[in-house]
Image (spheres, rainbow, N blue to C red):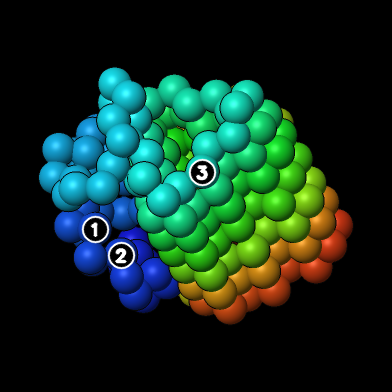
Amino acid sequence: MKPPEISTFIPQWPSLGIGTRAAWLIAQDCENQVLGLLSRLGAGYRRHGNCAIHETATVEEGAVLKGPIIIGEGSFVAAGAYLRGGVYLGKNCIVGPSCELKSSFMLAASKLAHFNFVGDSLIGEGVNIEAGAIIANYRNELDGAAIKIRYADDVIETGVNKFGALVGDGCKIGANAVIAPGAILEPNSRVPRLGLIDQFAYE
């Protein structure tokens, strides 16, 4: 099956100029992708090594940033947040206290509340992830087996053993929900509190 087009889920994706590879391949190459964006950034960013923070963004003391990282206009990163492995935050994003964001893109106005982990994922615009919700990126129970996704009555063989989710614009993920590795969430999906989304193809 042909991989789903990212722009179907995140219409603003083409504006980043990254290309049309599968979401899991972009997540696997997140550090290089963010480095490429760093080389093309315009004015208005404060540079700290390979981290770029917009002059209107706020990063509280106690946040840990391990580049390459781009923190966009008006975004907020709270004390105790941990960003690593290639991270891109668009405009007006929030990463709350005690959140870990690893090798992921978050587009405009998306929010991690607090006590979240998001790994190897592409998050669209206007996504809200409530406290304690997790987007996992590794099949620990299967010894890191390559991720196979059941989607649209077919099975997608990703060929990678780390991938979190492709989360479409406007999704709402409730507190303490778990998004298992290899999820594809249609725009405006609702995941209830304590919910589990698991699209892995076990057979």
Which kind of residue does numbered mark 1 sit on? Leu
Check disc 1 and report the residue beneath it: 16
* Quadrant showing the N terminus: bottom left
Q: Is residue 36 visible?
A: yes
Q: CA distance from mark 1 to mark 3?
A: 22 Å
Question: Where in the figure is residue 115, as x and y percent of width and height?
Answer: 75, 40
Relative to residue 96, is residue 7 drawn left or right?
left
Relative to residue 63, is residue 41 drawn left or right?
left
Q: Residue at x 34, y 74 (%)?
A: 11
Up-down relation of residue 61 to residue 123 (above or below): above
Check disc 3 and report the residue beneath it: 58
Q: Are marks 2 and 3 in contact (CB under 8 Å)?
A: no
Up-down relation of residue 90 to residue 31 (above or below): below
Q: Residue at x 51, y 32 (%)?
A: 83
Q: Are marks 1 and 3 in contact (CB under 8 Å)?
A: no
Question: Where in the figure is residue 70, as x and y percent of width and height?
Answer: 35, 41
The mark closer to the camera, 2 or 3, is 3
The residue nearer to you, when weighing 4 against 94, is 94
Q: Residue at x 78, y 46 (%)?
A: 132
Check disc 2 and report the residue beneath it: 13
Q: Are marks 2 and 1 in contact (CB under 8 Å)?
A: yes
Task: Give the crowd class for mark 1: few <14, some 14-19, many >=20 residues within 10 Å.
Answer: few
